[in-house]
Image: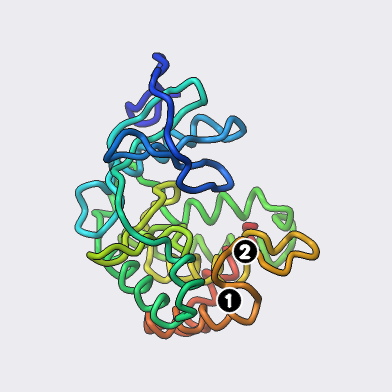
Amino acid sequence: MNYHGIRLPDKEEITTPGKKLSEGRNANVYEWGEDRVIKLFKASYPTELVTFEYYNALAVKNLPFRKVMVSELKKTEFGYGIIYEKLSGENMMDYIGRTGNLKEAAVMMADLQKSINKCTFDIENTGALISAHQLLRKNMIKSKKADSDATREMIRFLGTMKEGSSLCHGNLHPENVLITDDGPVALSASDYCIGKPLFDIAKTFFLIAYTPLPGEEKEGSECPVCRGISNTEERKEFGRHYLDAMGKSATEIGGYLSMIIAGM
């Protein structure tokens, strides 16, 4: 796979990953030496998305917001992985579980998101980062509700909307924020795109308030492994604090939120 000049490596790295630091749906993170980590993708994860994420990480590497810095792309005996710097800090989900302070966490996440959205691009020269509208259209066309009148109308309306020029994280939620001594840091480069900040706000709100948290889908689980936001009411409360911190209302993000939901 060649994505904007980036090829998956052919040579297998002999170094074995160290201690597992976190586990996700598509990848696990392990120590890689003393000052780096490897995000090691699961065998089921499409290899073209590995190069896509690596390209995104390189595309935003020098922009003025706090993110984990990318190093290189590796092939190991366990699969493909992306090497990042190792940072000391606490995952925001763990912070919420430890302190119970949903409002303070929401403010920190909002401040981080604002710093990301302040980065802008020439709309005609985005460095091949995908546009948010392109992503929304693709998801709605592929969704199970693509043939519904409501979804067709949203696709048509999207075509009349002006494209934005701000950097959007596209996947910002508490699991993807690391709290360090120097402030919150953005994790995951899989969904960076170019669009309007309202899209990014709507996507984060959707991830907070609408999607099942890790462990919630397990029947009889009294203690979801989300570690912090343990029920629907707390998710909604966190979502309200987040919108307040971003200075937006549910009405303002309603259009993008409807399109995001239609694309699921």
Around disc 2, counting alpha carbons within 10 Å, would you say few (fewer than 14), some (14 to 19), or many (20 or more)? many
Q: Quadrant of residue 247?
A: bottom left
Q: Is residue 48 above or below residue 99?
A: above
Element on which disc 1 rests: helix
Pinpoint residue 163: horizontal percent, then vertical percent: 38, 61
Pinpoint residue 256: horizontal percent, then vertical percent: 52, 69
Around disc 1, counting alpha carbons within 10 Å, would you say few (fewer than 14), some (14 to 19), or many (20 or more)? many
Screen quadrant of the N terminus:
top left
At x 45% / y 81%, what residue is drawn? 101
Identify which residue, 15 or 128, lies in the foreground: 15
Question: Is residue 17 toward the left or the right of residue 47 in the image?
Answer: left
| Alpha carbon separation for disc pair 1 and 2 | 9 Å
The label number, if any, that marks residue 212 in the structure image: none
Q: Amino acid at mark 1?
A: Arg
At x 62% / y 69%, what residue is drawn? 210
Identify which residue, 230 or 209, lies in the foreground: 230
In this figure, which residue is indicated by the disc labeled 2? 213
Pinpoint residue 162: horizontal percent, then vertical percent: 39, 64
Element on which disc 2 rests: loop
Question: Is residue 115 toward the left or the right of residue 38 in the image?
Answer: left
At x 41% / y 50%, what residue is drawn? 188
Sooner in the amino-acid sequence: mark 1 or mark 2: 2
Q: Amino acid at mark 2?
A: Leu
Q: Quadrant of residue 230?
A: bottom right
Answer whether labels 1 and 2 touch (C-beta < 8 Å): yes
In this figure, which residue is indicated by the disc labeled 1? 235
Q: Quadrant of residue 228?
A: bottom right
